Image: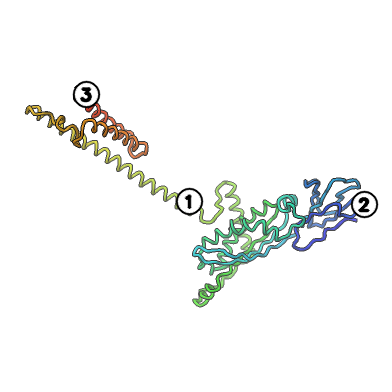
């Protein structure tokens, strides 16, 4: 006689040792249309079974073997979610309901059963709670303020669709299919009473279930197609964040460009001023020679009144500073060239003077 699987409504999968199945010459199982099974041999899958009667062991099957039964009929999860925080730091609760079914018995055995002998609906929720609540629902609620939640149906639908898209992906990983997802928010008692006093709680006419399912299917399809092309945004508001970052970068680049242009302008004006001063010095030197006076440069070796060596060191530092500004893109190559040429020219003059001074 073939064994039929006796299970509770909350049971999704159960591991049964072949040795516990009745039968001397052979052990058989009987599966209904909503049941699958996987035969294990030393923890590894050997064979899969669907609806019908199947032999799982012969008379001399010595190895330790198990049959993992899997229920593929729809299952429901009802959970109250506490501790969700809105953008204006209001704590709210939510009630969610999900219906799902098994599509891949081997994935369920491998990824969800583990060492369990029985896998329940509660076990599935434990596995998926973090992904659905912490990673998907909480970040979306955090972008809302509690005032928005007074329009409950509209916001619930928006969040439901966004979370459902993510939840479908997580369910598929474990060989499950999400059939439906709904969420209802429970506002803080004092805030709800406050809204009632103000008369701001309005009843919205809920659209038909067909329209909602169509919207969900369209959203899921659009996001999956976008994800294939690499353009999907997995969290609401990501596009806005990117736009803000782009505007910020453009503003920073514009400021940096303006500063660079100003630095170049200042450098060029400095060079022009230096040329004027050099010409004035040369004119003064010529005039003093014509008058038989001592050279002005010998009296005052440099503009700051320092020694020739100090002036030479100052030019060397100026060249280093100009090269640093060029590497920082604060001046262009042409400006750097002019500044270095002028400095090297003056260094050469100073070297001649320092040599004469030594003699």
Q: Residue furthest left?
A: 291
Q: Earlier in the sequence, mark 2 or mark 3?
A: 2
Q: CA distance from mark 3 to mark 1?
A: 63 Å
User: Of the numbered discs in the image, which one, if any, rests on residue 173?
Assistant: none
Mark 2 against mark 3, which lies toward the viewer? Answer: 3
Residue 261 picture location, percent across and down: 31, 42
11 to 24, vertically: above or below: below
Element under disc 2? loop
Foreground residue among 294 and 121: 294
Residue 352 picture location, percent across and down: 21, 24
On the image, which quarter does residue 6 sit in?
Answer: bottom right
Circle 1 sits on which residue?
242
Q: Earlier in the sequence, mark 3 or mark 1?
A: 1
Residue at point 80%, 57% (across, down): 33
The reply to whether discs 3 and 1 touch (Cβ–Cβ < 8 Å) is no
Foreground residue among 358 and 193: 358
User: Of the numbered discs in the image, which one, if any, rests on residue 24?
Assistant: 2
The reply to whether discs 2 and 3 touch (Cβ–Cβ < 8 Å) is no
Residue 226 is left or right of residue 284, and the answer is right
Residue at point 52%, 72% (across, down): 191
Q: Residue furthest right?
A: 25
Circle 3 sits on which residue?
355
Q: CA distance from mark 2 to mark 3?
A: 116 Å
Residue 325 picture location, percent across and down: 34, 38
On the image, which quarter does residue 124 sit in?
Answer: bottom right
Residue 344 is left or right of residue 116, and the answer is left
């Amino acid at each position: 006689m073939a064994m039929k699987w006796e299970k509770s409504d909350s049971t999704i999968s159960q591991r049964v040792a072949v040795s516990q199945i009745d039968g001397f010459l052979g052990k058989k199982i009987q599966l209904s249309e909503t049941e699958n099974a996987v035969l294990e041999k030393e923890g590894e899958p050997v064979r899969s079974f669907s609806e019908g009667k199947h032999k799982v062991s012969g008379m001399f099957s010595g190895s330790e073997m198990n049959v993992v039964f899997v229920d593929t009929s729809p299952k429901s999860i009802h959970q109250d979610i506490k501790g969700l925080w809105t953008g204006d730091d209001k704590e709210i609760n939510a009630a969610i309901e999900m219906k799902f079914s098994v599509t891949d018995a081997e994935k369920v055995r491998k990824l969800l059963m583990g060492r369990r002998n029985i896998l329940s609906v509660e076990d599935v929720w434990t596995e998926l709670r973090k992904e659905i609540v912490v990673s998907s629902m909480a970040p979306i609620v955090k972008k809302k303020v509690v005032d928005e939640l007074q329009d409950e149906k509209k916001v619930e639908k928006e969040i439901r669709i966004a979370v459902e898209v993510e939840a479908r992906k997580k369910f598929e990983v474990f060989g499950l299919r999400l059939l439906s997802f709904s969420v209802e928010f429970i506002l803080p008692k004092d805030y709800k009473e406050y809204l009632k006093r103000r008369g701001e709680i309005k009843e919205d006419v809920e659209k038909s279930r067909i329209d909602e399912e169509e919207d969900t299917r369209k959203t899921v399809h659009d996001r999956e197609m976008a994800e294939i092309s690499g353009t999907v945004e997995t969290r609401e508001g990501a596009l806005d964040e990117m736009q803000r970052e782009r505007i910020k970068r453009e503003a920073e680049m514009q400021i940096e460009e303006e500063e660079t242009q100003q630095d170049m302008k200042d450098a060029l004006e400095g060079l022009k001023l230096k040329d004027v001063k050099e010409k004035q010095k040369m004119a003064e030197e010529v005039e003093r020679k014509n008058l038989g006076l001592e050279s002005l440069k010998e009296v005052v070796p440099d503009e700051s009144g320092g020694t020739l060596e100090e002036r030479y060191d100052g030019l060397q530092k100026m060249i280093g500073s100009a090269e640093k500004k060029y590497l920082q893109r604060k001046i262009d190559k042409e400006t750097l060239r002019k500044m270095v040429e002028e400095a090297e020219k003056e260094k050469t003059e100073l070297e001649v003077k320092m040599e004469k001074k030594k003699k």
